[in-house]
Amino acid sequence: MSPAGAGGRGGSPYQGRRRPDQPPAGRGVTRSRQVAFEVLRAVDEDDAYANLLLPHRISAARLSPSDAGLATELTYGTLRRRGTYDAIIAEASGRDIRDIDPPLLDVLRLGAHQLLSMRTPSHAAVNESVEQAARIASRGASGFVNAILRKISRTELADWLDQVSEGLTDERALAVRHSHPDWIVRALRDALTAEHRGDELPASLAANNESPAVSIVSLPGFDTPDELVASNPDLLVSGRISPRGLTLASGDPSWVPQVKAGRARVQDEGSQLVTLALLEAEPVRPGELWLDMCAGPGGKAALLAASATELQAKLTANELVPARAGLVRAALAPLAAPVTVTNEDGRSFADSHPGTFDRVLLDAPCTGLGALRRRPEARWRKQSSDVAELVQLQEELLEAALAAVKPGGIVAYVTCSPHQAETTAVVRRAVRISGAEVLDAAAIATRASSTPDLDLGARPLGDGTLVQLWPHRHGTDAMFLALLRRAPAANPEKQTP
Ligand SMILES: C[S@@+](CC[C@H](N)C(=O)[O-])C[C@H]1O[C@@H](n2cnc3c(N)ncnc32)[C@H](O)[C@@H]1O
């Protein structure tokens, strides 16, 4: 069923009408809402990435900083909480949401977000939504939007949540309340249960719906974090867990001159910590060779490259995808560091570089379930069926990393995902096949950190531990870290004849 005349996927929903990116004539829809609506449509129709498209649309629409903030909240908030709003829209309309034309559904989702989570006055949210529906569809469609949103506006979010989760299993109810697909709820539950922290599941789901603070890394060899804070007292405060980390207190990262110059970078503190832990695992000797096996777009490579200059090491930064290898080159260029950028498949890297490196960072391609806060549409785009293919790639890359490192050398296996199949299972298999030693990543990460009590909930494996960071506990992305030491070469003198 579809409201008469509503635009569907086939033709342009804007035929004969003003496109939503055009300024409104007089009353009606604010430009920030137009921008948000347009980005939602592009995410749905063209598989666009909101975090890449939104800044372009904001600047094309010449939004003021406060309107840009509003457009961002509307876009990100609506995308993140889509699962919850869809359940409420279905309940309020008595329809399966698949029977509502996609552009109208986005109008309803935006309206629901304004009404239930942004405290926009009801009349403003409803009127804007009705106007927007009229632009893209028929009068019937705007009447439909009017009726549904008025109904939604009469009940508080908490009461809607009780209503739509009534009679559901615990897991389904959490999925609806916190707007996650069921398979991701299960993956997070399994990872937390492995730490005996299953009770943190609601907090972990809730944290994925919050906008993360912007974290900055001060690259070694340039301003220290304290110097950065001192020279940008209105913009920066010290970070939480990385000794090189800072948090943007206000404004935009590009307002920090050191960020503009490439001497400090935007980087999650969890990403900083797992990279620093590789260097902390044992003292760095001058002349060491380091490999970043999957380096694109170059965030962790920049931290390694700047450290290599300070510690007299040499870095090879490798990336499979040529365009992303270009991003790595661009990221490293301002550092004038001892780095070579290569463009190879990491799986065959050890064929040309067997037993070569003292340390290897394998920041593996993964589902990205640890960064759902940053990529608001990602949870709806990923499928549980993606996991198996990624796991095979991760297994092959880790085998290659352990072959590319020298006997006795160290591999950091990192994912931005807490999914057990991508983390513990991949490491367990590699250890079984290679005989690598599992280091105490929790103790090493704690040493590398600026906080004595990281509350890592470390998971034991072999003689060592595995580390899982969490947004709700550490304020970072959910980065996973294992530190493996390749078995040392057999000493011929000790061998029995
Ligand atoms: C998680 S990202 C790395 C992020 C990066 N370390 C950073 O901090 O900016 C994984 C990267 O691995 C690359 N990749 C995927 N398959 C690969 C392969 N077989 N060999 C090398 N790189 C690969 C992807 O293109 C992607 O850029």
Image (cartoon, rainbow, N blue to C red):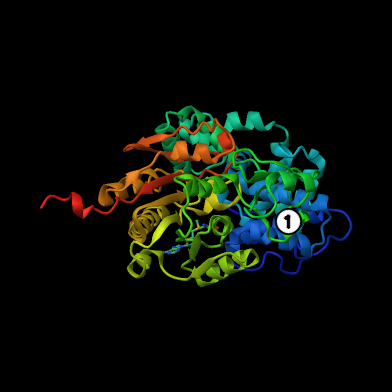
376 displayed left or right of 359:
right
434 displayed left or right of 117:
left
Circle 1: is it few (<14), some (14-19), or many (20+) Cα within 10 Å?
some
Q: Residue 481: x percent and y percent?
A: 45, 45
- Comparing 101 with 369, the one in front is 369
Query: Given the image, on which type of amino acid does mark 1 rest?
Result: Gln
- Comparing 223 with 434, the one in front is 223
Q: Residue 328: x percent and y percent?
A: 56, 65
**At 84% from the left edge and 60% from the top edge, which residue is drawn?**
24
Q: In this view, does 410 lie above or below 49?
A: above
**At 54% from the left edge and 56% from the top edge, which residue is drawn?**
304
- Comparing 286 with 319, the one in front is 286
> Can I make out residue 343 in this image?
yes
Residue 474 picture quarter? top right
Residue denoted by label 1: 258
**At 45% from the left edge and 34% from the top edge, which residue is drawn?**
192
Q: Residue 460: x percent and y percent?
A: 37, 35
Q: Is mark 1 within 8 Å of ligand 1?
A: no
